[in-house]
Image (cartoon, rainbow, N blue to C red):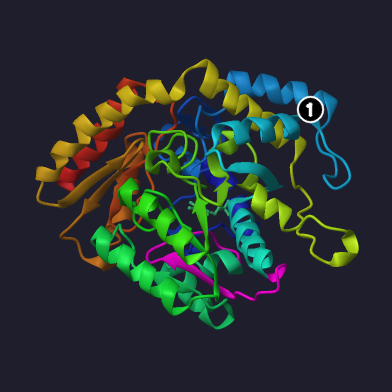
Amino acid sequence: MTNKMLMQEDLKYIFHPCTQMKDHEKIPLIPIKRGKGAYIYDFDGHKYLDCISSWWVNLFGHSNDYINLKIRGQIEELEHVIFAGFTHKPAIDLAKRLVSITPKALTKIFFADNGSSAIEIALKMSFQYFKNRGESRPLFVSLENSYHGETLGALAVSDTGLYKDIYTDILLKTIQAKSPALVDENDALNDMRNLLKKHKGKIASVVIEPLVQCAGSMKMYNPSYITKLRTICDEEGVFLIADEIAVGFGRTGSMFACEQAGISPDFLCLSKGITGGYMPLSCVLFTQDIYDAFYCDYNEGKSFLDSHSYTGNTLACAVANAVLDIFENDNIIEKNREKIDLIRDLTKPLEKLSNVKEVRQRGMICAIELQGYDAKERIGLKFFQEALKEGIYIRPLGNIIYFMPPYVITDKEIRKMVGVVEELLHVV
Ligand SMILES: *Cc1c(COP(=O)(O)O)cnc(C)c1O
C-alpha cells in the first residue's frame, strides 16, 4: 500500500470534515499508517511531528504504552453497556475523579460522546432548569468570535461566520456580547451587563470559552474577565457555562482554565483531551442546585430525557481514567511549565519579523498571527504544505499559525517545530 493508492480509494467514497473536497485534486490527502509519541507515519515512510495534537485532542502521544495497556485490560472485561438503568466502574471512577479536580461547586456529571453534544446538554439543561420552575427563558448569550461546535444548538451560540452564516435561517436566536479577546475588558464586561439587563428574565445562560477562543483565530484574554463575568452572572441570575472542551486538561497551563480566574462555572463542558485523543467522550459537570431542579417523581415531567447511544462508553471512560493517572503520576502540569517557557522563548522574538503581526501564548497554546498577505493567497495552506515537507504538521487557521502540541513533545522537537516555521517565515 502506498499513500497514493489509499488516497484514491478514500476519495472514491469519503467526504472529509471541514474540507472542500475539490482541494484534494491538488493537495494530497495523507493516509496515516501508525503513530508513536508526537509523531504520525504515512504509508510512504514519511513521519510528521503532530504539532496540533490531531485537532487538539492528543495529550500523551499516539499509541501511548500506558493507555494501550489500560484499554487492552478494559476491552477484555467490558467494551460498552447501556448507560440508562446500568452503570460501570470506569464511569464511576471517572465521575468521582473529575468532580474532585474541577472547581468545587461542580458536584454532578452527565456524560455524552462529543464536544458539541456536551454544549447541547448544557444549553438544554440551563433552559429546562428555568422551565421546571415555571419560567421560559429562550435566549442564550455567547461571545463574539466564539466557537462551540457544529450541531445546530452549538452552532447557534457560535460566532464563526465561516461555519455558521449559511445556516442562519434554521438556527436558534442567540445574542453575542463583545469578546474580551477583541475589545478592552471593561467594554466587554459593560456590553455583557447591558445585554443581560436588557433581556432580563429571558436569558438562561451565558456560554464562554475560558481564556482562549481557539477556533476563533486563537484569540486570548485574561482570567480577570471570567472572574468579573461570574459576578455579573450571579447578579443577573443567569447560568455561566464554561466550554473547556479545547482548553481543559492542561492546555492553558492549569488543569482547567477556570482555575486561573478562581471561579466555579455552573456548567463545565469537557471533551477533546479527556481521552488523550483516543476515543470520543464528553461530559458536562454542574452544581447540586441544578441537579435538584430535575429531581422529582417521574410523572411530574421535570426529568432531563437527553440521551446518546454511546453515552458514558466504558472503553472511553477507562481511557479517560488512564489519562488522569498520567496527569497524577507524571506531574504533567508542573512539567509542562518548562515546555511552555521554551515555546515562549523561541516564538516571542518572531514578533520582530515584518510578516508577523503578533505572537500570543497561553500555556501550551501558541499562535503566530501573520500580516501582509492577500486573503486570497490562502497563506496558511502554503505554510502547511511547506512545513509538511520538513516533517512538521501544522494546520493554520487562515493567517494564524499555531502550535498546540501533545505534552510528550521533547525540547528538541519543540525546537524543530518552531525552527521550521521560523525558516518559512523568512522565505514564504
Ligand atoms: C472542538 C470544540 C467543540 C466541539 O467539540 P466536537 O467534539 O468537535 O463536537 C466545542 N467547543 C470548543 C471550544 C471546541 O474547541
Residue at x 75% of width, y 58% of height: 294
Q: Position of residue 162 (x, y in %)?
A: 42, 69
Q: Position of residue 424 (x, y in %)?
A: 21, 42
Number of other residues with Cα within 10 Å of mark 1, as a class: few under 14, some 14 to 19, many 20 or more:
few
Q: Is residue 275 above or below residue 187?
A: above
Q: Is residue 350 above or below residue 133?
A: above
Is residue 223 something one can see in this rendering? Answer: yes
Q: Quadrant of residue 74?
A: top right
Q: Main secondary structure of the magenta part?
A: loop
Name the residue tied to disc 1. 75
The residue closer to the viewer here, 10 or 56, is 56
Q: Position of residue 230 (x, y in %)?
A: 43, 54
Q: Quadrant of the N terminus?
A: top right
Look at the image and say whether residue 132 sits in the magenta stretch.
Answer: yes
Q: SS for tag 1?
A: helix
Q: Quadrant of residue 122?
A: bottom right
Q: Is residue 181 above or below residue 338?
A: below
Q: What's the residue type where badge 1 is placed? A: Ile
Counting labels gives: 1
Residue at x 40% of width, y 74% of height: 195
Q: Position of residue 102 (x, y in %)?
A: 54, 37
Is residue 213 something one can see in this rendering? Answer: no
**Which residue extends farthest bottom?**
169
Residue at x 38% of width, y 67% of height: 144
Question: Label 1 CB, ligand 1: below 8 Å?
Answer: no
The residue closer to the viewer here, 141 or 417, is 141
Q: Is residue 71 above or below residue 389?
A: above
Residue at x 49% of width, y 34% of height: 44
Look at the image and say whether residue 162 sits in the magenta stretch.
Answer: no
Query: What span is in magenta?
Result: 131-151
**Which residue extends farthest top?**
329
